[in-house]
Image: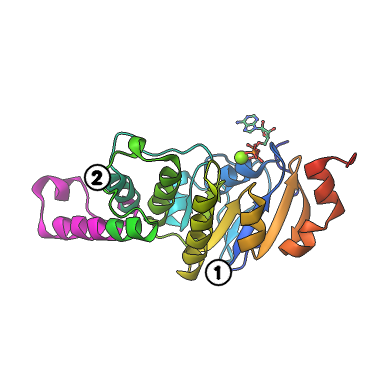
Amino acid sequence: MALQDVSFEIDRGQIFGLIGPNGAGKTTLFNCLTGVYRPTAGSFVLDGKNITGLSEVKAAQRGIARTFQNIRLFQEMTALENVMVGRHSRTAAGLWGALVRDKKTSNEEREIHNKSQQLLEFVKLKGSEDLLAKNLPYGHQRRLEIARALATDPQLICLDEPAAGMNPSEVSGLMQLIRNIRDSGVTVLLIEHHMKVVMGICDQLAVLDGGERIAHGPPDRIRNDAQVIAAYLGTQH
Ligand SMILES: Nc1ncnc2c1ncn2[C@@H]1O[C@H](COP(=O)(O)OP(=O)(O)OP(=O)(O)O)[C@@H](O)[C@H]1O
Ligand SMILES: [Mg+2]
């Protein structure tokens, strides 16, 4: 059983941290929430509406966006194009409009282009618009994934270990970026092993171990929770 009896609530406008040792079930929970897996039991409720078992496309349309633990960019596309793809989930023009290039379609294309530029600026990737995703440094690729997720206009963004592989100065920049995302009105669900990030920016935390929620509360309480310390370090310590 990958997840069992895991239950928590996230308030609008929070940065909510989901932590736990390797293999605890954190990414699996993201996969259930974002439509990659269909859970066999339990439910997800967003704004009072049951959203359990939606497809990935439907989850995005409902306002849930995510990034991936193992970066999944369109490697052969530019940074700008990667963000524009994310934006297409919010546009109306179809194949016909694209073929005949009517006014509505070209206006929409311009809107996608401008919005994507703004998002690249927001994640501090201005100047890298035309670089292929595969040629960006690792930390930039992580920020580009965040921009692509934001392009879907989410109300909840789920970040799976965004600080992984970042150097200390990139980590500080990332912490500020996540706060800025929250300040822009997007609720953040954050999986992260980097404790400086978790303890520094999260309002609330849930701790998973072996697929179960072993603790839940504000960072200060979690930091001193005996069961959490044991899960991370083992009882010998
Ligand atoms: N598709 C799958 N089929 C079978 N087992 C899986 C599958 N995906 C994950 N698991 C297992 O489920 C458990 C939870 O994995 P998950 O990737 O959710 O952990 P995690 O908390 O994200 O860990 P990490 O911090 O290492 O990323 C692990 O034991 C993993 O091996
Ligand atoms: Mg994981």
- Mark number, residue 130: 2
Question: What residue is shown at x 57% (from left), y 68% (from top)?
Answer: 12
How far apart marks 2 and 1 lie (CA) works out to: 33 Å
Q: Is residue 7 visible?
A: no
Asked which quadrant contains residue 132, the reply is: top left
**Comes first in the chain, label 2 or label 1:** 1
The kind of residue on which mark 2 rests is Asp
Badge nearest the viewer, 2 or 1: 2
Question: What residue is shown at x 37% (from left), y 61% (from top)?
Answer: 122
Asked which quadrant contains residue 133, the reply is: top left
Mark 2: is the Cβ under 8 angstroms from ligand 2?
Answer: no
Question: What residue is shown at x 46% (from left), y 45% (from top)?
Answer: 56
Mark 1: is the Cβ under 8 angstroms from ligand 2?
Answer: no
The magenta stretch spans residue 113: yes
Q: Position of residue 5 (x, y in %)?
A: 75, 49
**Which stretch is magenta?**
88-115
- Mark number, residue 89: none
Query: Badge 1 is on which residue?
Result: 13
Dominant secondary-structure state across the stretch colored magenta: helix
Q: Position of residue 218 (x, y in %)?
A: 72, 64
